[in-house]
Amino acid sequence: MNAQIGIGMVCPFDMALDRELWRWMPESVSLYFTRTGYIDAPVDVELCRDLNNHAEISAAVRAVSSVAPRAFGYACASGSFVYGMAGAMEISNCMLAAGAERAVTTSEALIRALNTMNVGTLAVATPYTAALTGLLCDFLAESGRNVVAQAGLGRDHEIWAIPYHVTADLIRAANHPDADAVFVSCTNLWTYDILADLESELGKPVLSANQVTAWATLCDAGVLGGETTPADWPTTHAQSLFARSIAA
């Protein structure tokens, strides 16, 4: 068996989609998941602020550092955009201080993906409450992006139970003719199997929280963006973000 490239994933306590993040990984990559502590609260602004517990994030990083991941991701969109761009950077700096060689949050990964795709104007689809969706739009505006449309489900619990067809309709509802792309937020929302089809249907990139997190951590781990690409890639080549990064 060939040596594995490790990526550490720090997740909130309620993360239910470990399997989805695995689907972006070639056989040569192993994910090491670790979680922050349980909080008894609905998924809204206050919970997402509470997820910014740097002591717990540092402990989560140290919990898997012994297996030497090449990169770490903080796999939570709302927990990393709730305090704006500075708050997202503070989380990644916290992970670096705890021993991560490289670190990126989902929200920072989104900005990197938008830069790669040359997206300046976009539409936003979320499962969130209106207040949390508004903070995502504020975060994107702070990064210099123009959000021309948005749609949300107003969901504050069990986001992982939302079926694909509901998410697909949400993305369609958020789409706007002036949007260069659509971003669908939340790492607890299933998206893998619908992204390529919706890109074909809408004629533009459709990015998701888990997708950009997987992509950015793979780049940081040196798996993407080099002269060679593993031969065992899954079907991510059909998604435009990965198609730009996977060498022929």
Image (cartoon, rainbow, N blue to C red):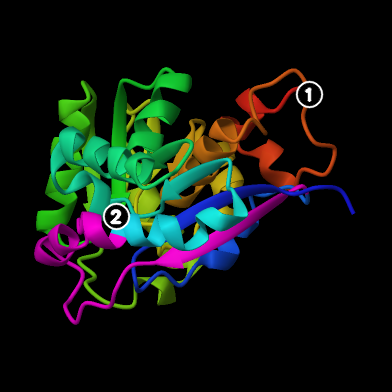
Q: Whole-percent x and y of residue 98?
A: 36, 47
Q: Which quadrant is the C terminus positioned in? A: top right
1 vs 2, front mark: 1
Q: In the rendered structure, find residue 126 and report the number of the disc placed on it.
A: 2
230 in relation to 31, above or below: above
196 part of magenta stretch: no
**Segment colored magenta:** 28-56
Residue 75 vs residue 162, the one in the foreground:
75
Cα distance between the residues tagged 1 and 2: 35 Å
Name the image quarter holding residue 1. bottom right
130 left or right of 236? left
* Nearer-N-terminus badge (1/2): 2
* Residues under numbered marks 1 and 2 in contact, where contact means CB atoms less than 8 Å apart: no
How many labels were placed on the picture?
2
Q: Whole-percent x and y of residue 45?
A: 12, 60
Q: Residue furthest right?
A: 1
Identify the residue at horizontal 67%, vertical 34% (top origin): 223
Residue 101 vs residue 31, the one in the foreground:
101
Identify the residue at horizontal 57%, vertical 49% (top origin): 7
8 left or right of 46? right
Identify the residue at horizontal 40%, vertical 36% (top origin): 109
Identify the residue at horizontal 31%, vertical 31% (top origin): 122
Name the image quarter holding residue 31. bottom right
Q: In the rendered structure, find residue 228 and report the number of the disc placed on it.
A: 1
Q: Secondary structure at mark 1?
A: loop
Circle 2 Cα neighbour tier, 10 Å, few/some/many (<14 / 14–19 / ≥20): many
- Whether residue 69 is visible here, answered yes or no, is yes
